[in-house]
């Protein structure tokens, strides 16, 4: 009998590694652990000492009695040497050495996916779906302002309605919206508006339908933000940053990040504190935010326990941008806002997560996690209802939201491992999850406001609205789901595997609004969703894959339906159903340069789309029937040479309505047919007294329709960024100076549209300079 093991066939039985290999690994670990415990990340560039393994000495013959007396002094000397040998390395010393070894890879933009994204520790080459990673060092170099900015590095992603710049809202492969449940932290869902903050280490995107692993979801995929974790060696940093949009629009950030062991039994802590206060780049507004993020971890022999908490307090400008009239933007300076200085959103968010990972044996691992996320906010939302481009007269509604509350309680548990069936290896994932999510808006303000002239603006003549509209208030969206899922990767041969999986899901959704409450959605149903795929590993560094996946999302709305006022969306209304066929190629060349080439075809049916009702100034929803998205994506990240690193992407996305009397043939709103990005970094290494790194790049987003009827188009744009870091030492402490210029050429560009009266404008040129002291 032959068994497949570690990419080879072993005859008869599985063999353990030889003693000589074990000796080599132990020797290397000891030499690594001899690095001092106060090693900082800056020392990671040091060359590790070579490992020399001596040939085993022959076993000596028994000594004769006449020789024993002469050997006693030698035996005593050997004993003294053994008694004075260095102590075994501590957990802290081992952790410091491992961090030093990993840092060079991080500087080279090495993409190392988290196990939480695919619910397993499988290599991307051994999976049948595309996973793109924005590594930790990319975030450090580029300093993205939000998740939309970070995901400019990933193919096929554009921004959609961000609710006036206060919500994460990204379209993946043609699908997505704000508050669509697709943003995760460590594989568990978030409801807070902004997910990217200094507690996040990296960002990953699982492309295509992810309902097998994540339940109710749009077919574009999920975005998983990965937390910074406590580490078992003591180190930290303090960063101060100053920024400016121009001579009068300035700001400052401060960040403290410290981590280390508690005792010597594997317990570690981390504390992250962050604050920012900066002027908004347009003619008024200010962004303030505070974050406190403590976390604990225990790293046992076979068990890891993680506990993390985040508390945020924030105030954002609530800015819906500008207006497009007759297909063109208003002829006013890009800095001129159309609302009032009191247009802001303010609130707090809290996130607590706990997880336990236990290795049962060398083949099986158990994971259990729980997450609770809540956010409360209020906002003044003065809204544009019409603009006369000739006279400049703008009509407005003095709107607002009081007492908004969102929360999500989520738990999951699954077991992963492998077993042999004959000479075929099965890699199995089995588990379940449950979620209860609520989005609630208590009082909605609707109040008339006097007209305003965009060409000769006079601000401050009115204050925030106070009139509560009972018919628009108590906006409620409650979703509950409970599921079991199973997936098996069956290795038929050394190079070929089949993937199959299924999820059984039971769900309820209630949505509506009004005081008294009027139900617009009341759904209770269940579903079975399959997954299938195949993987062909051409080499250890190159694989082909193909997959078939499905997604499901119940149709729901709190807004009136233009094609059936008073109709309740219930279980008799089919949910949005997505089906994707995907094939592609993945590579990981010498663990330096990795990437994916993917081709996909997604079809989604029973889709609701929104369109502005000019009579009321509000969006209404209609069923679009069937839509499809077809495309090609290329993503590459890693090290090109010892000095050059890069992250780049290209996406072609043809997303349009295929069956609907009104919208057939129309492109999907805010979806660009072409997107591309390229970011290059040159590391001078030790050529200078300190370590100098220079980098820069650009992102391109093509034309996009600004509404469902394609009545106007957002023009394409190219935005360039550059940065430079210089690391040196002040006395014994490493210090890093970093200069970033975002939107280098101060390009005017439009990132997304809610409708033609709410078109978001990309940030102006921003220059920042920071200093980081490590200790």
Image (cartoon, rainbow, N blue to C red):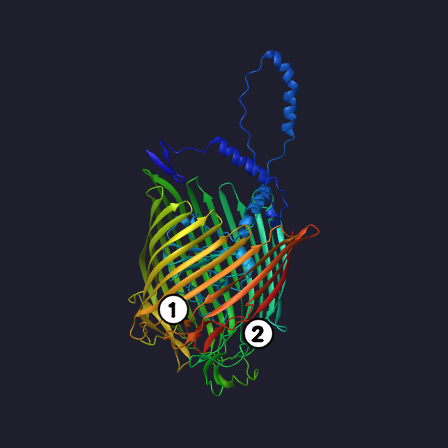
Apparent side of residue 186 relative to residue 262 in the rendered image (left or right): left
Between the C-alphas of marks 2 and 1, the distance is 33 Å
Q: Identify which residue is drawn at 63% across, 34% down.
A: 86
Query: In the displayed image of the protein, which residue is found farthest to the right?
Result: 731
Q: Is residue 179 at least partly visible in the picture? A: no
Which quadrant holds residue 724?
bottom right
Q: Position of residue 590 (x, y in %)?
A: 47, 46
The answer to whether 584 appears left or right of 320 in the picture is left
- Mark on residue 285? 2
**Viewer-nearest residue: 452 or 693:** 693
Number of numbered discs visible in the structure rendering? 2
Q: Which mark is residue 343?
A: none
Counting from the top left corner in percent of width and height, residue 59 is at 53, 21
Q: Is residue 276 visible?
A: yes
- Residue closer to the observer: 661 or 480: 661
Please say if 705 is above or below 39.
Answer: below
> In front here: 751 or 557?
751
Task: Give the x, y percent position of residue 365.
Answer: 43, 44
Q: Quadrant of residue 66?
A: top right
Determine which residue is flagged by label 1: 511
Quadrant of the frame with the N terminus: top left
Q: Secondary structure at mark 1?
A: strand
How many neighbours does mark 1 have within 10 angstroms: few (below 14), some (14-19), or many (20 or more)?
many
Dot 2: what SS? Answer: loop
């Amino acid at each position: 009998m032959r068994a497949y093991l570690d990419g080879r066939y072993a005859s008869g039985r599985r063999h353990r590694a030889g003693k000589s290999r074990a000796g080599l690994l132990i020797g290397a670990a000891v030499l690594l652990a001899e690095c001092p415990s106060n090693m900082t990340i800056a020392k990671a560039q040091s060359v590790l000492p070579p490992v020399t393994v001596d040939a085993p000495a022959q076993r000596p013959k028994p000594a004769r009695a006449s020789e024993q007396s002469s050997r006693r002094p030698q035996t005593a000397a050997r004993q003294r040497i053994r008694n004075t040998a260095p102590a075994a390395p501590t957990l802290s010393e081992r952790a410091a050495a491992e961090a030093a070894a990993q840092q060079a890879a991080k500087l080279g933009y090495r993409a190392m996916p988290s196990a939480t994204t695919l619910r397993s520790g499988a290599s991307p080459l051994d999976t049948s779906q595309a996973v793109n990673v924005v590594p930790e060092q990319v975030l450090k170099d580029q300093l993205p302002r939000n998740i939309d900015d970070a995901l400019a590095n990933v193919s096929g992603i554009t921004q959609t309605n961000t609710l006036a710049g206060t919500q994460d809202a990204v379209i993946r492969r043609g699908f997505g919206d704000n508050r669509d449940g697709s943003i995760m932290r460590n594989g568990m869902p978030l409801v807070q508006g902004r997910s990217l903050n200094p507690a996040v280490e990296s960002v990953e995107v699982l492309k295509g339908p992810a309902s097998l692993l994540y339940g109710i979801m749009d077919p574009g995929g999920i975005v998983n933000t990965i937390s910074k974790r406590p580490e078992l060696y003591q180190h930290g940093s303090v960063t101060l940053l100053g920024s400016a949009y121009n001579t009068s629009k300035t700001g400052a950030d401060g960040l403290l990040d410290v981590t280390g062991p508690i005792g010597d039994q594997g317990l570690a802590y981390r504390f992250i504190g962050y604050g920012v206060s900066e002027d908004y780049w347009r003619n008024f507004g200010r962004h303030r935010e505070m974050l406190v993020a403590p976390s604990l971890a225990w790293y046992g022999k076979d068990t890891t326990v993680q506990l993390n908490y985040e508390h945020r307090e924030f105030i954002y400008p609530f800015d819906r941008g500008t207006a497009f009239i007759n297909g063109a933007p208003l002829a006013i300076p890009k800095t001129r806002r159309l609302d009032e200085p009191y247009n802001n959103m303010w609130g707090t968010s809290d996130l607590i997560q706990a997880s336990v990972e236990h290795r049962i044996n060398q083949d099986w691992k158990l994971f259990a996690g729980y997450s609770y996320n809540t956010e409360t906010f209020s906002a003044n939302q003065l809204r544009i209802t019409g603009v006369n481009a000739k006279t400049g007269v703008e009509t407005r509604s003095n709107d607002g939201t009081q007492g908004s509350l969102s929360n999500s309680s989520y738990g999951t548990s699954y077991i992963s491992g492998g077993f042999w069936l004959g000479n075929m290896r099965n890699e199995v994932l089995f588990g379940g999850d449950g979620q209860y999510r609520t989005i609630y808006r208590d009082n909605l303000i609707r109040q008339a406001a006097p007209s305003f002239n965009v060409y000769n603006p006079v601000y401050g003549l009115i204050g925030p609205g106070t009139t509560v509209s009972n018919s628009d208030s108590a906006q409620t969206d409650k979703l509950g789901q409970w599921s079991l899922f199973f997936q098996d990767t069956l290795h038929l041969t050394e190079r070929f595997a089949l993937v199959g999986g299924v999820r059984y899901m039971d769900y309820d959704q209630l949505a509506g609004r009004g005081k008294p409450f009027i139900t617009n959605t009341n759904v209770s149903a269940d579903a079975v969703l399959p997954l299938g795929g195949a993987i062909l590993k051409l080499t250890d560094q190159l694989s082909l894959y193909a997959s078939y996946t499905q997604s499901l999302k119940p149709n729901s709305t709190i807004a009136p339906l233009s094609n059936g006022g008073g109709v309740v969306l219930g279980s008799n209304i089919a949910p949005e159903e997505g089906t994707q066929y995907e094939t592609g190629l993945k590579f990981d060349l010498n663990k330096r340069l990795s990437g994916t080439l993917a081709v996909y075809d997604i079809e989604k049916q029973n889709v609701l789309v929104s369109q502005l009702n000019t009579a009321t100034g509000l969006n209404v929803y209609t069923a679009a029937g069937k839509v499809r998205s077809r495309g090609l994506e290329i993503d590459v990240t890693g090290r090109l040479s010892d000095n050059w690193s890069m992250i780049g992407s290209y996406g072609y996305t043809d997303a349009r309505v295929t069956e609907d009397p009104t919208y057939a043939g129309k492109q999907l709103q805010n979806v660009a047919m072409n997107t591309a990005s390229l970011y290059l970094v040159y590391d001078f290494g030790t050529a200078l007294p300190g370590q100098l790194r220079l980098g820069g790049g650009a992102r391109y987003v093509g034309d996009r329709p600004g509404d469902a009827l394609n009545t106007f188009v957002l023009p394409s744009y190219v935005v360039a960024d550059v940065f430079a870091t210089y690391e040196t030492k002040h006395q014994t402490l490493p210090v890093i100076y970093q200069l970033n210029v975002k939107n280098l050429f101060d390009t005017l560009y439009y990132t997304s549209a809610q409708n033609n009266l709410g078109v978001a404008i990309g940030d102006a040129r921003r220059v920042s300079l920071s200093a980081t002291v490590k200790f």
